[in-house]
Amino acid sequence: MDDYSHILFNKTPQQLRLIGARGGKAFGRNERARRALLAAPAPTVPPPVPPCQTTAADIAVLDARFPWLRGAEKRQSARRRAQVFPAEKRAA
């Protein structure tokens, strides 16, 4: 293995900065050349957009398929339940 440590001895700080700058410029030049040789990445394809179905449309589909569950998604107050199911109140 070659020993280039003698290059850094007996140099002024300004000379050492120039040596470092030269290395940095060479590294940057080589890095740009390396990147230019790489193949360009394939363009990304956005994922397909799923069909947009609203909650209201889903509820309508369920209501058509299961008519006995119609309105099950709606909350009822205690007073409304007593009016709809009066026997339930008497049994309790």
Image (cartoon, helix red, strand yellow):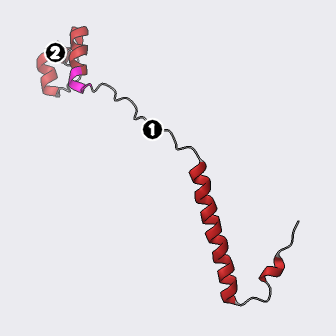
For image coordinates 67% across by 77% down, the residue present is 20
Closer to the eye: label 1 or 2: 1
Quick one: SS at disc 1? loop
Nearest the eye: 50 or 25: 25
Res 59 → quadrant: top left
Instruction: Tell me: 29 left or right of 52.
Output: right
Residue lying furthest right: 1
Neighbor class of circle 1 (other Cα within 10 Å; few <14, some 14-19, many 20+) is few
Mark 1 to mark 2: distance in Å? Answer: 58 Å
Q: Give the residue number, with chain letter if any, for mark 1.
A: 44
For image coordinates 64% across by 65% down, the residue present is 27
Q: Position of residue 84 (x, y in %)?
A: 13, 16
Q: Is residue 29 magenta?
A: no
Asked if residue 66 shows in the view, the reply is: no
Nearest the eye: 82 or 68: 68
User: Which residue type does callout 1 highlight?
Assistant: Thr
Q: Give the residue number, with chain letter if any, for mark 2.
A: 85
Where are the magenta residues, as a range? 53-57
For image coordinates 79% across by 80% down, the residue present is 7
Q: Position of residue 50 (x, y in %)?
A: 34, 27
Q: Position of residue 75 (x, y in %)?
A: 20, 27
